[in-house]
Image: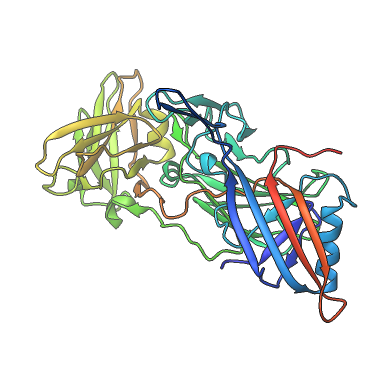
Amino acid sequence: MPRNLWIGHPGRLREIEQAATSWERGAELGVGQFTSLGGQVTTHAPRRAARKLKLSFDRLPEADAAHLDRLARRVDGPGPIAVLDPVTRNLLDPLQASGRSGGGSGQWAVAAGSGTLVPSTTDLPNTWKWRPAAVGDRLAWTLRPWPGFPVAPGATVRFTLPTAWRVTPGTAELGWLAADGRTLSTTSATGPTVTGTAPPGAAFVVPAGSAGASGGDLMLSGAVLTADDAYAPRAPRELLAAAAAAGKAPLSQWQADGTTLSEDAGYAVLALPANTSGTLRWRNGDAPGFPVAPGEQVALTVSRELRARAANCYLTWFSAAGTFTGFADTWMSAAAPPSAAYVQPALQFDANSAAFSARVGATGLRAASPDADLPGDGCPPMAITAYTDTPGRPLPHRSISLDLTEVTGATG
């Protein structure tokens, strides 16, 4: 198991090192059934089943028993309490990790900039996308009713951006908060994954990220948040050869239409005359494009100069036989369609009164496979609904049983 049980109010989590002698992990299904006189059966159920836990400990050490006793009797407050059980790996809610919600976009919040969350009309119900208005716009993942996800000081936390973001030049971030919501510090990293250690006084962590691009929508599925877990996400594949990725000759790695390519000190230079439109395509020898697998997220990242001058970025898909199967017009990432075996990236330049010349520069054409091996499991707020405490042998050990149920809040 990745970790021991952690339980308590955020900011006062305690690790229970002793394994439970009995441990049930289920859900409150709440399914009702009605059978008509004609034999037809109708069932009704809530939209979502609440998580339930039943834990029993035999001869628990006195300090651990006292901690659980205070939680059960609400000595330190009504709750809700946080439970990080050993089975939970991806702390994001199951729907949240898949880019969906039970209604509304409340599982995310705009952390910086003026980007917006927009509903998807082509995917599963309640699927959301991120539409950054600028390169630096940042989105945060949230857990109601708390300001972040509960964490214990010293825990190693890793956050990986959604699959569609991993091929863009983004940044990932962990914001550490005190129990009262004050910001303590921030850990950030360039790339799709950030790893940090919760500082002293940390009660919550807020994962956030920036795609480092704008001009399109990004799916939110595939994000992963772990604590003290060895999971490491798959890194994106770079499809370009080293020379093409560095913008270096030979010039046969590109195809210029309406533009011209030349060489300067071993680097490829693109020139576009005034009042002329043109296209620059990346080539992979005699192949229709660069090999991809269906469902992979693919994105082209170009130099700042080319990004500022180009009007459009196209990802054109071809089948294994070299047949055109579609294209994506996006500066973000796009998923390879089911029939795709190759992708050819291209930039479209509109006519302009000023001539343009610049090195092709550093380029990335990256592909990332969906991470289906670590779906969201969640760490929902919970309330203790039943509690027994029996003196153990030898004293002062105690045998304790707890029943816990997922809640949206707790009072009284």
Is 256 in front, or is 177? 177
Q: Position of residue 298 (x, y in %)?
A: 34, 42
Residue at 26% in and 43% down: 294
- In this figure, what is the number of numbered marks? 0
Residue reaching furthest to the front: 37
User: Which quadrant would residue 12 be assigned to in this image?
Assistant: bottom right
304 above or below 235? above
- The quarter of the rendered structure image containing the N terminus is bottom right
376 above or below 328? below
49 on left or right of 259: right
Residue at 26% in and 21% down: 276
Is 33 in front, or is 266? 33
Is 80 in front, or is 132? 80
Whether residue 91 is visible to the viewer of this picture, yes or no, is: no
Q: Position of residue 334 (x, y in %)?
A: 35, 36
145 above or below 61? above
25 on left or right of 166: right
Residue at 87% in and 39% down: 412
410 above or below 184? above
Q: Position of residue 168 (x, y in %)?
A: 43, 43
Task: Give the image's coloring scheme.
Answer: rainbow
User: Which quadrant would residue 234 be assigned to in this image?
Assistant: bottom left
Residue reaching furthest to the bottom: 394
342 on left or right of 175: left
Whether residue 53 is visible to the viewer of this picture, yes or no, is: yes
Q: Position of residue 293 (x, y in %)?
A: 25, 47
